[in-house]
Image (tube, rainbow, N blue to C red):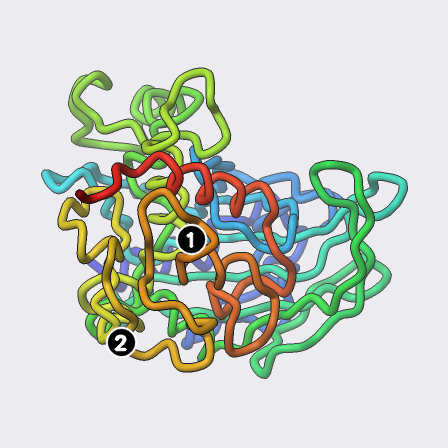
Amino acid sequence: MRIVIALAWIGMFAMGCSQPAKRPAAGFHDKLSDYGFFTGALKDLSPAARVHLYELATPLFSDYTVKKRFIALPEGSTMRYTDSSALDFPDGTYLIKNFAYRDSTGREILLETRLLHKDVADGKWKVMNYKWNAEQTEAEKWITGAQVPITLTDDAGQRISTHYQIPNTNDCKRCHASAGTLIPIGPKARNLNYHGQLEKWATAGILQGMPEIGKVAKFPVWNDSAHYTINERARAYLDVNCAHCHTKGGDADNTGLFLEYGQEAPSRLGILKGPVSAGNGAGGMDYDVVPGDPAASILHFRMNSSEPGTAMPELARTITHREGVDLIAAWIRQLPKTP
């Protein structure tokens, strides 16, 4: 079966490229253009056949970058909704995430493209990064990471200068590893239950096994105060930005701080829990979360820092997400104080 899928993948993008490149055995080309994911000018990110744009209800914060995400499916294959409310992707799938920043004119400048590939050889997910050139004509395989000086415009229109961090592939594996196995983070059914995406895919026949949409969990939108409570939005934000590491089997398993959306144990959420391995990052404070007092909470302190060794998350950002920090502060303030 995997041989058939592999052969189908090699020719699946012929419509998008005049001379489609042969897919290498390891699953990763040297140049992004070699895949045929996009038609026309590469920087326009216009998807070819079998490449599907998707959005997340609550995304990971990465230095106010603009992200465009796509799923590339092998010809003749479909995704499947499972009993665990996850999506099962067929062997040969590529998940494509493009990062760009807005300059002072509002123009989007592409920085990197990250690929997760479910290899047809063994069914395991593998990762590769691609760095865009200054001309915005190509992105090349980039394994070792890079620091790119940029001046971006944030969501409030303010200009911020930083050195954007393109991770090396080992850094990617740190966040995407669960019990030693590489997995996708963002595209879970609940986080994709947004703007009618799941229904559209089911109707198009590329998503099988989905129940009635009302039975699919719907993830809160972190900045939608009109439809979700502070608790719902903050917990969604912590899940997406922190729980890939702060979960059983994650990179921060040893901390005992578990920030999944469904987590109910107060101590695992950090409430009046002492730090295990924060070191100087604790800022001299005693507890991860002190109900009613963000200023005394290590969680808030570390999110509000951009200093290496203190800032959390450790990866994916070099500047503070002011709006996210404000949300977590509001969440901590409304937590009931223990008698």
Q: Do the residues labelled 1 and 2 touch (CB within 8 Å)?
A: no
Q: Nearer the viewer, residue 168 or 74?
A: 168
According to the picture, the residue beneath numbered tag 2 turns out to be 276
- Determine the residue located farthest toward the front in the rendered image: 339
Which amino acid does the dot numbered 1 rest on? Asn
Q: Nearer the viewer, residue 210 or 63?
A: 63
Label 1: element kind: helix
In the rendered image, the quadrant that contains the N terminus is bottom left
Q: Residue at x 30, y 69 (%)?
A: 177
Q: Residue at x 30, y 61 (%)?
A: 183
Eye-nearest disc, 1 or 2: 2
The picture quadrant where one finds residue 197 is top left
According to the picture, the residue beneath numbered tag 1 turns out to be 241
Please say whether residue 270 is visible from this viewpoint. Answer: yes
Q: Residue 307 carries which label?
A: none
Q: With 271 as the anchor, is 59 left or right in this view?
A: right
Q: Residue at x 29, y 57 (%)?
A: 91
Q: Position of residue 256 (x, y in %)?
A: 21, 67
- Determine the residue located farthest toward the left in the rendered image: 83
Q: Where is residue 262 in the image (x, y as percent from the top left)?
A: 19, 42
Q: Where is residue 140 in the image (x, y as percent from the top left)?
A: 67, 71
Q: Residue at x 16, y 21 (%)?
A: 215
For mark 1, does the 10 Å Cα neighbourhood hold few (<14), some (14 to 19), or many (20 or more) residues?
A: many
Label 2: element kind: loop
Tell me how many marks there are.
2
Which amino acid does the dot numbered 2 rest on? Val
